[in-house]
Image (cartoon, rainbow, N blue to C red):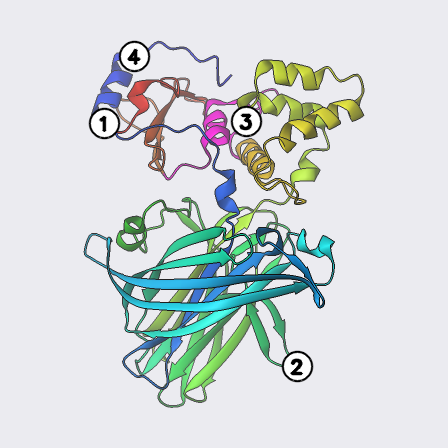
Amino acid sequence: MAQGYSEKRSRWGACVLLALGMMLAWTPDLRAQEAVPEFDVDYLCKRDAAITHETQVEIYTRIPYPRLSFISTPSGFTARYEVSAEVSEIDAKARKSNVVLTRLWDGKVVAPTYSATQEEEFVDFTMQTVSLPPGRYVLDVQIEDKQSNQLFVRELPLIVRDLNKPVAVSDVSLLDSYDADRYEIKPLVSNRIGTNDLQVKIFYEVYAEQSLPVTISHQVIRREKDGGVSALQQVFETAGDDGPSEVVYEKVDSSPLEGRTNQFIVDLPLEDGKAGVYEVLVRVEDAEGNVLDTASKTFTAQWTGLYEHLTNIDEAIDQLAYIAKKKEVKYIREGKTEGERYRRFMAFWKKRDPTPGTKRNERMEEYYYRVAYANERYTRTSRDKGWQTDRGFVMVRFGEPDDVERHPFSFNAKPYEVWYYWRIGRRFIFIDETGLGDYRLLVPIYDERTRIH
């Protein structure tokens, strides 16, 4: 059991601890709310036909209705907000330096009914176009609700590519919707999909100075490493180093580029039910196989099987062990009927809902996604479920690690793994004492020796 491991330390284990070193501080909060920010921001770099030395950047925002304050007006329930975008250059250490561009624009939402203003599914979309020289920037976007004066802020790295080449590929955009008759596209600004989605639709452009035959390949890659970043420096300095990966789909098409701008909308299938970080890679090659240009897009597939997972309420109550107090679990479990236990169970999670008043409870979803992930990865026997193992315990408690060192075979040591959580300043070591895949924590999670200095 995750909480019943021995606290005895071998001499070998102490040497591993000393050799690996330690850093930062531990914060025990689950990070579920980060998966659903107050609003979403994305961008798409395209060739700027008017300014040859700059790139056109389309900035998108998407905000759910419940984040805004509505008032009753003759035309319906109305919300107004202001969007401000600031683009800053970065220095060699990925720190923001001088501001190179600012832009303000307004958003307005009119909902027909009050109930519509409370629905998470209803969102308002804006787009603003700017031009920037190729380079690395930071994009800060702020939304101010004009009724409540509440502010929402997002920051993300902005990499502007040079698209003024003989053959170039624009950024890749995931599509939320596409009207083939009107040729109207709407980007999926959140870059999040559900694991029940069986495909993803992408849009991109290929630019060419003249007509020529090319081969365009599309790959869908599932990344093993956590796609979340805690610092801009990690994005800029580790670009292209995403750890172990798996190509889950590949398609190659041969097609001539007919004009200066060639637009493509492509449907790509996904693995059914596989949550994680994915990347779509588009590569353009000439007739001799030389790569002319590439572009990629990263997105996240979030587990959507929560309520299927909760068909066994008693098992779901048992799995509260890592987040609930013993007396809370005891109270829920003592419900005389399954219905009573379910009501107590949902009341427990309602108190922890980061977005009360909406249909979803993101913290609950994240927690049981982690349980399901641990069960899939670490279950060894029917009596020893994955979430009950030491690795499962850490997975449920802290989420997927930022980095993993695996040492399954070693001449002078037992198999072991080291999980790094740079975002919380901790690192955990698991040792397979039996050689049968039964990895146990070397020291408890609260031990100061897990701290990374």
| In front: label 3 or label 4 | 3
Instruction: State which tag comes first along the sequence, 2 or 1.
Output: 1
Position of residue 351 relative to residue 256, above or below, is above
Residue 175 visible, this orientation = no
Residue 452, quarter of picture:
top left
Secondary structure of the residue carrying tag 3 is helix
Gap between marks 2 and 1, in whole Å? 60 Å
Residue 431 visible, this orientation = yes
**Is residue 314 within the magenta segment?**
no
In the rendered structure, find residue 21 and report the number of the disc placed on it.
1
Residue at the (68%, 16%) spot, across then down: 331
**Frontmost residue, 132 versus 306:** 132
* Percent position of residue 350, x then y: 65, 33
* Percent position of residue 418, x then y: 34, 30
Residue 269, quarter of picture:
bottom right
| In front: label 1 or label 4 | 1
**Frontmost residue, 419 versus 30:** 30
| Label pair 1/4, CB-CB below 8 angstroms | no
Gap between marks 3 and 1, in whole Å? 28 Å
Instruction: State which tag comes first along the sequence, 3 or 1.
Output: 1
In the rendered structure, find residue 191 and report the number of the disc placed on it.
none
In the rendered structure, find residue 181 and report the number of the disc placed on it.
2
Q: Residues within 10 Å of mark 3 (few under 14, many from 20)?
A: many
Kind of residue sitting beneath label 2: Asp
**Is residue 394 within the magenta segment?**
yes
Question: What residue is disc 3 on?
Answer: 387
Position of residue 129 relative to residue 2, above or below, is below
Report whether 168 appears left or right of 30: left
Secondary structure of the residue carrying tag 4 is loop
Kind of residue sitting beneath label 1: Gly
